[in-house]
Image (spheres, rainbow, N blue to C red):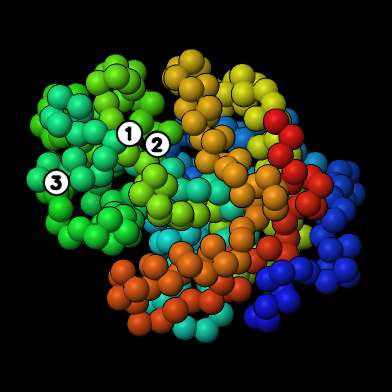
């Protein structure tokens, strides 16, 4: 893929993708899209459910089903297998995945959801953990076995000039993570910052230290909306329609968070609206991070992504360096005007 394809799609392609599909009696059936989340249903992904409940996907001629995920890494393999056409997954993990593949990428990012990865280690202050990463030395930190925050730790260690085994990992599952922190079985745990709201509900914030990876100078793009090669090549209009509908819902979620959480609760009635509102408040900080003020929601800076590729390839000793053109396909993004941060 040529550099110009990354930077801008042709006028003809833009025209073909710009108009939403309309379907009804006598019209073609809606295009089915199976979408996998990265994890369970929470306020982190509220815009997808707002778009679904308000009929935005239907308006684009799409029949979208949304399933819970098994981690942001697993989303990539789900899409690559063909079981899902689109999903939410981690960019660094996509770099690793593409480094093991040859030929045309099976999965590409088409919209950057988290403009910055919300990776954090959250520790107990009574165990001596502060906002200084060096306070983690010798501590016991819980994390799931395959989890993007844990996998990104070597990038932080390298930036800090410490060894990967600076502290001891304690492998647990997502469901048990809060429990082991609260009980004191470990000194802290890895989280998506917004996922830690469940912990904040059980421990006072002033009892915890939040060590955001960005504060260590690690500027990583996080989870992105991914699409299969079959979708981007055979039905780019459907991908563009999905992104238009989702982008619209992201804007509306930032303007009216309560409506977004209410739509999410329709799908997952057990959710606590107050907790999920707080979760979304943190999430939107990472979605509408500083970069988005200049290039809009969903886009990336090519140089920043190149630096992320370089770091991941170097730290993990990958034999192949994926090109950014194959990682991020911006040809189906909504217009720059639609992606301008309004809230």
Quick one: quadrant of the N terminus? bottom right
Residue 22 horizontal side relative to residue 271, left or right = right
10 Å crowding of disc 2: few (<14), some (14-19), many (20+):
many
Asked whether the residues under the numbered discs 2 and 3 touch, taking CB atoms below 8 Å apart as contact, a structural biologist would say no
Residue 116, horizontal then vertical, whole percent: 50, 48
Q: Which residue is drawn at 19% across and 34% down?
A: 129
Residue for point 55% across, 49% down:
115
Badge 2 vs badge 1, beta-carbon distance below 8 Å: yes
Q: Which of marks 2 and 1 is in front?
A: 1
Residue 96 visible within the image: no
- The residue that mark 2 highlights is 193
Disc 1 or 3, which lies upstream in sequence? 3
Up/down of 9 relative to 48, above or below: below
Q: x and y percent of residue 240 in the render?
A: 74, 56
Q: Which of 311 and 33 is in front in this view?
A: 311
Q: Is mark 2 on a helix, strand or loop?
A: helix
Picture quarter containing residue 250? top right
Q: Where is residue 144 in the image (x, y as percent from the top left)?
A: 25, 46
Quadrant the C terminus occupies: top right
First in sequence: mark 2 or mark 3? 3
Disc on res. 137: 3
| Element under disc 3 | loop
Rounded to the nearest angstrom, the CA distance separating label 1 from label 3 is 15 Å
In the rendered image of this protein, does residue 177 appear above or below residue 320?
Answer: above
Instruction: Give SS at disc 1.
Output: strand
Question: Which residue does the image show at 68% across and 63% down from the upper left?
Answer: 330
Lower position in the chain sequence, tag 2 or tag 1: 2
Mark 1 lies on residue: 210
Tell me which corner region of the image, top left, top right, bottom left or bottom right, holds residue 311: bottom left
Q: Where is residue 6 in the image (x, y as percent from the top left)?
A: 68, 71
Residue drawn 82% across and 60% down?
17
- How far separated are the C-alphas under marks 2 and 1? 8 Å
């Amino acid at each position: 893929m040529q550099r110009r394809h990354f930077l801008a799609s042709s006028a003809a392609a833009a025209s073909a993708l710009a108009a939403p599909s309309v379907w009804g009696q006598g019209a073609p059936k809606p295009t089915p899209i199976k979408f996998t989340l990265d994890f369970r249903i929470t306020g982190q992904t509220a815009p997808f459910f707002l778009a679904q409940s308000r009929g935005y996907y239907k308006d684009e001629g799409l029949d979208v089903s949304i399933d819970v995920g098994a981690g942001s890494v697993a989303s990539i393999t789900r899409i690559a297998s063909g079981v899902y056409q689109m999903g939410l997954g981690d960019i660094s993990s996509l770099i690793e995945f593409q480094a093991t593949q040859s030929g045309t990428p099976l999965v590409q990012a088409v919209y950057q959801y988290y403009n910055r990865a919300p990776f954090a280690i959250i520790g107990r202050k009574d165990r001596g953990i502060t906002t200084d990463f060096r306070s983690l030395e010798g501590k016991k930190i819980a994390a799931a076995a395959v989890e993007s925050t844990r996998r990104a730790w070597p990038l932080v260690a390298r930036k800090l000039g410490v060894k990967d085994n600076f502290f001891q990992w304690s492998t647990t599952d997502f469901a048990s993570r809060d429990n082991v922190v609260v009980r004191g079985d470990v000194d802290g745990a890895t989280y998506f910052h917004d996922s830690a709201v469940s912990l904040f509900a059980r421990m006072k914030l002033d009892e915890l230290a939040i060590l955001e990876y960005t504060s260590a100078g690690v500027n990583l793009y996080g989870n992105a909306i991914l699409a299969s090669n079959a979708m981007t090549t055979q039905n780019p209009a459907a991908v563009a329609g999905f992104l238009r509908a989702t982008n619209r819902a992201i804007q509306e979620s930032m303007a009216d968070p309560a409506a977004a959480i209410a739509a999410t609760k329709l799908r997952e009635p057990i959710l606590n609206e107050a907790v999920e509102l707080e979760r979304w408040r943190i999430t939107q900080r990472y979605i509408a991070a500083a970069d988005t003020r200049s290039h809009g929601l969903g886009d990336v800076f090519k140089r920043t992504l190149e630096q992320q590729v370089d770091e991941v390839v170097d730290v993990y000793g990958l034999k192949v360096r994926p090109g950014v053109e194959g990682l991020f396909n911006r040809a189906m993004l909504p217009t720059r005007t639609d992606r301008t941060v309004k809230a």
